[in-house]
Amino acid sequence: DGKEVTPNFNRLAEKGVFFKRFFATGGRTSNGLVATLTGIPDRPMMSTLHSQEANARVSGLGKLLKQANYQSLFMTGSDLSFENMEPHIKRWGFDMIVDEKIIDKTNRFEKGVWGFDDGDGLQLFNEYLRAQNKDNPFVATYLTISTHYPYKVPDKKFEIFDSNTKDHSYLNTYHYADFAIGEFIRSAEKEE
Protein backbone atom coordinates (compact mmCIF):
# COMPACT_ATOMS: atom_id res chain seq x y z
CA ASP A 1 0.00 0.00 0.00
CA GLY A 2 3.02 2.29 -0.39
CA LYS A 3 3.72 2.33 3.37
CA GLU A 4 7.14 1.56 4.81
CA VAL A 5 6.51 -1.19 7.36
CA THR A 6 10.03 -1.33 8.83
CA PRO A 7 11.86 2.00 8.49
CA ASN A 8 14.18 1.29 11.43
CA PHE A 9 15.14 -2.18 10.22
CA ASN A 10 15.67 -0.80 6.72
CA ARG A 11 18.17 1.74 8.08
CA LEU A 12 19.96 -1.02 10.01
CA ALA A 13 20.12 -3.17 6.87
CA GLU A 14 21.88 -0.35 5.04
CA LYS A 15 24.53 -0.04 7.79
CA GLY A 16 25.20 -3.70 8.44
CA VAL A 17 25.18 -7.05 6.71
CA PHE A 18 21.85 -8.07 5.22
CA PHE A 19 21.15 -11.43 3.62
CA LYS A 20 18.41 -11.29 1.01
CA ARG A 21 18.35 -15.07 0.59
CA PHE A 22 18.51 -17.52 3.45
CA PHE A 23 16.69 -20.55 4.75
CA ALA A 24 14.59 -20.27 7.90
CA THR A 25 15.62 -22.62 10.68
CA GLY A 26 12.06 -23.76 11.25
CA GLY A 27 8.51 -22.61 11.52
CA ARG A 28 8.45 -21.85 15.24
CA THR A 29 10.36 -19.59 17.62
CA SER A 30 11.83 -22.62 19.38
CA ASN A 31 13.40 -23.80 16.09
CA GLY A 32 15.03 -20.42 15.62
CA LEU A 33 16.37 -20.33 19.17
CA VAL A 34 18.00 -23.73 18.84
CA ALA A 35 19.68 -22.81 15.56
CA THR A 36 20.71 -19.30 16.58
CA LEU A 37 21.98 -20.05 20.08
CA THR A 38 23.60 -23.45 19.45
CA GLY A 39 24.62 -23.23 15.80
CA ILE A 40 22.79 -26.49 15.08
CA PRO A 41 19.76 -26.46 12.75
CA ASP A 42 16.72 -27.73 14.61
CA ARG A 43 14.82 -30.77 13.41
CA PRO A 44 11.54 -30.29 11.56
CA MET A 45 8.18 -30.73 13.26
CA MET A 46 9.06 -31.22 16.95
CA SER A 47 11.86 -28.99 18.24
CA THR A 48 14.76 -30.56 20.09
CA LEU A 49 13.64 -28.36 22.99
CA HIS A 50 11.16 -31.15 23.66
CA SER A 51 13.86 -33.81 23.82
CA GLN A 52 16.09 -34.02 26.88
CA GLU A 53 18.32 -36.58 25.16
CA ALA A 54 18.91 -34.45 22.08
CA ASN A 55 19.91 -31.39 24.09
CA ALA A 56 21.83 -33.06 26.89
CA ARG A 57 25.15 -32.72 25.08
CA VAL A 58 24.46 -29.57 23.06
CA SER A 59 26.44 -26.52 24.05
CA GLY A 60 25.40 -22.97 23.33
CA LEU A 61 26.54 -19.44 22.73
CA GLY A 62 26.75 -18.57 26.44
CA LYS A 63 29.05 -21.51 27.24
CA LEU A 64 31.20 -20.93 24.19
CA LEU A 65 31.78 -17.26 24.96
CA LYS A 66 32.25 -17.94 28.67
CA GLN A 67 35.53 -19.61 27.66
CA ALA A 68 36.63 -16.16 26.43
CA ASN A 69 35.48 -14.54 29.73
CA TYR A 70 32.21 -13.15 28.38
CA GLN A 71 29.24 -12.53 30.62
CA SER A 72 25.87 -13.18 29.01
CA LEU A 73 22.22 -12.16 29.15
CA PHE A 74 19.14 -13.71 27.57
CA MET A 75 15.98 -11.66 27.83
CA THR A 76 12.40 -11.80 26.57
CA GLY A 77 9.04 -10.38 27.57
CA SER A 78 7.44 -13.83 27.37
CA ASP A 79 7.31 -16.76 29.80
CA LEU A 80 10.26 -19.07 29.20
CA SER A 81 8.43 -22.03 30.68
CA PHE A 82 6.50 -22.07 27.39
CA GLU A 83 7.84 -24.87 25.20
CA ASN A 84 10.33 -25.76 27.94
CA MET A 85 12.75 -23.03 26.82
CA GLU A 86 14.23 -21.95 30.17
CA PRO A 87 16.21 -25.10 31.08
CA HIS A 88 17.77 -25.14 27.64
CA ILE A 89 18.77 -21.49 27.76
CA LYS A 90 20.41 -22.19 31.12
CA ARG A 91 22.16 -25.24 29.65
CA TRP A 92 23.40 -23.09 26.78
CA GLY A 93 25.33 -21.08 29.37
CA PHE A 94 23.56 -17.76 29.80
CA ASP A 95 24.54 -16.10 33.09
CA MET A 96 21.45 -13.91 33.41
CA ILE A 97 18.01 -14.92 32.19
CA VAL A 98 15.18 -12.40 32.34
CA ASP A 99 11.65 -13.25 31.27
CA GLU A 100 8.04 -12.28 31.92
CA LYS A 101 8.16 -13.44 35.56
CA ILE A 102 11.08 -11.15 36.42
CA ILE A 103 9.78 -8.20 34.39
CA ASP A 104 6.39 -8.55 36.11
CA LYS A 105 8.07 -8.03 39.50
CA THR A 106 9.21 -4.55 38.43
CA ASN A 107 5.55 -3.40 38.32
CA ARG A 108 6.49 -1.00 35.51
CA PHE A 109 4.68 -2.35 32.46
CA GLU A 110 1.36 -3.81 31.39
CA LYS A 111 1.24 -7.26 29.84
CA GLY A 112 0.23 -7.79 26.25
CA VAL A 113 -0.97 -11.00 24.60
CA TRP A 114 2.20 -13.12 25.05
CA GLY A 115 3.74 -11.19 27.94
CA PHE A 116 5.41 -7.80 27.85
CA ASP A 117 5.40 -6.09 24.48
CA ASP A 118 8.70 -5.50 22.72
CA GLY A 119 8.77 -1.76 23.42
CA ASP A 120 8.66 -2.29 27.18
CA GLY A 121 10.96 -5.30 27.14
CA LEU A 122 13.56 -3.58 24.99
CA GLN A 123 13.47 -0.55 27.29
CA LEU A 124 14.38 -2.79 30.21
CA PHE A 125 16.92 -4.66 28.04
CA ASN A 126 18.67 -1.35 27.35
CA GLU A 127 18.82 -0.68 31.10
CA TYR A 128 20.42 -4.09 31.69
CA LEU A 129 22.96 -3.42 28.96
CA ARG A 130 23.88 0.01 30.34
CA ALA A 131 24.42 -1.53 33.78
CA GLN A 132 27.14 -3.86 32.47
CA ASN A 133 30.80 -3.19 33.15
CA LYS A 134 32.10 -1.74 29.88
CA ASP A 135 35.54 -3.24 30.52
CA ASN A 136 34.26 -6.84 30.46
CA PRO A 137 33.20 -8.64 27.29
CA PHE A 138 29.45 -9.14 27.19
CA VAL A 139 26.92 -10.76 24.85
CA ALA A 140 23.17 -10.27 25.05
CA THR A 141 20.21 -11.79 23.24
CA TYR A 142 16.67 -10.43 23.18
CA LEU A 143 13.81 -12.63 21.95
CA THR A 144 11.06 -10.42 20.53
CA ILE A 145 7.45 -11.55 20.87
CA SER A 146 5.21 -8.84 19.45
CA THR A 147 4.98 -10.34 15.96
CA HIS A 148 3.51 -13.60 17.25
CA TYR A 149 -0.08 -14.62 16.62
CA PRO A 150 -2.76 -13.29 17.39
CA TYR A 151 -1.04 -10.15 16.04
CA LYS A 152 -2.17 -7.49 18.50
CA VAL A 153 -0.48 -4.11 18.82
CA PRO A 154 -0.37 -2.27 22.16
CA ASP A 155 -1.79 0.94 20.67
CA LYS A 156 -4.03 1.75 17.70
CA LYS A 157 -1.44 4.22 16.38
CA PHE A 158 0.56 1.22 15.10
CA GLU A 159 -2.34 0.04 12.94
CA ILE A 160 -1.14 1.56 9.68
CA PHE A 161 -2.94 -1.09 7.62
CA ASP A 162 -6.66 -1.88 7.70
CA SER A 163 -8.57 -5.03 6.80
CA ASN A 164 -8.40 -4.17 3.08
CA THR A 165 -4.72 -5.14 3.12
CA LYS A 166 -3.81 -8.82 3.07
CA ASP A 167 -2.15 -9.87 6.37
CA HIS A 168 -2.89 -6.43 7.84
CA SER A 169 -2.76 -7.62 11.47
CA TYR A 170 0.67 -9.21 11.02
CA LEU A 171 2.01 -6.20 9.12
CA ASN A 172 0.81 -3.91 11.91
CA THR A 173 2.61 -5.98 14.58
CA TYR A 174 5.69 -6.06 12.39
CA HIS A 175 5.49 -2.26 12.15
CA TYR A 176 5.15 -2.03 15.95
CA ALA A 177 8.15 -4.35 16.51
CA ASP A 178 10.15 -2.14 14.16
CA PHE A 179 9.09 0.92 16.18
CA ALA A 180 10.27 -0.81 19.39
CA ILE A 181 13.65 -1.63 17.82
CA GLY A 182 13.95 1.98 16.66
CA GLU A 183 13.27 3.27 20.18
CA PHE A 184 15.90 0.86 21.51
CA ILE A 185 18.46 2.09 18.98
CA ARG A 186 17.72 5.77 19.67
CA SER A 187 18.02 5.18 23.41
CA ALA A 188 21.34 3.35 22.98
CA GLU A 189 22.70 6.11 20.71
CA LYS A 190 21.86 8.75 23.34
CA GLU A 191 24.08 6.88 25.78
CA GLU A 192 27.11 6.95 23.47
Image: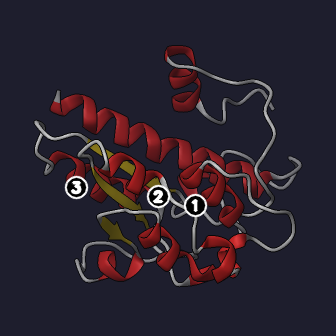
| Residue drawn at 61 percent across, 44 percent down | 175
The quarter of the picture where the C terminus appears is: top left
User: Would you name the residue on which mark 1 appears?
Assistant: 146
Compared to residue 13, the image places residue 34 above or below, namely below
Residue situated in front as seen by the camera: 66 or 163: 66
| Residue drawn at 77 percent across, 26 percent down | 2
172 to the left or right of 126: right
Where is residue 123 shown, x and y percent of the image? 31, 54
Q: Residues within 10 Å of mark 1 (few under 14, many from 20)?
A: many
Label 2: element kind: helix
Q: Are marks 1 and 2 in contact (CB under 8 Å)?
A: yes
Q: Nearer the viewer, mark 2 or mark 3?
A: 3
186 to the left or right of 51: left
For marks 1 and 3 on the same chain, the one whose residue lies earlier in the sequence: 3
User: Would you name the residue on which mark 2 appears?
Assistant: 118
Where is residue 125 shown, x and y percent of the image? 31, 55
Q: Residues within 10 Å of mark 3 (few under 14, many from 20)?
A: some
| Distance Cα–Cα, label 1 vs label 2 | 6 Å
The quarter of the picture where the N terminus appears is: top right
Give the residue type that dot 1 points to.
Ser
Residue situated in front as seen by the camera: 16 or 165: 16
Compared to residue 62, the image places residue 81 above or below, namely below
111 to the left or right of 29: left
Where is residue 45 shown, x and y percent of the image? 87, 70
Q: Which mark is residue 128?
A: 3
Where is residue 25 shown, x and y percent of the image? 76, 50
Give the residue type that dot 3 points to.
Tyr
| Residue drawn at 72 percent across, 68 percent down | 149
Give the residue type that dot 2 points to.
Asp
For marks 1 and 2 on the same chain, the one whose residue lies earlier in the sequence: 2
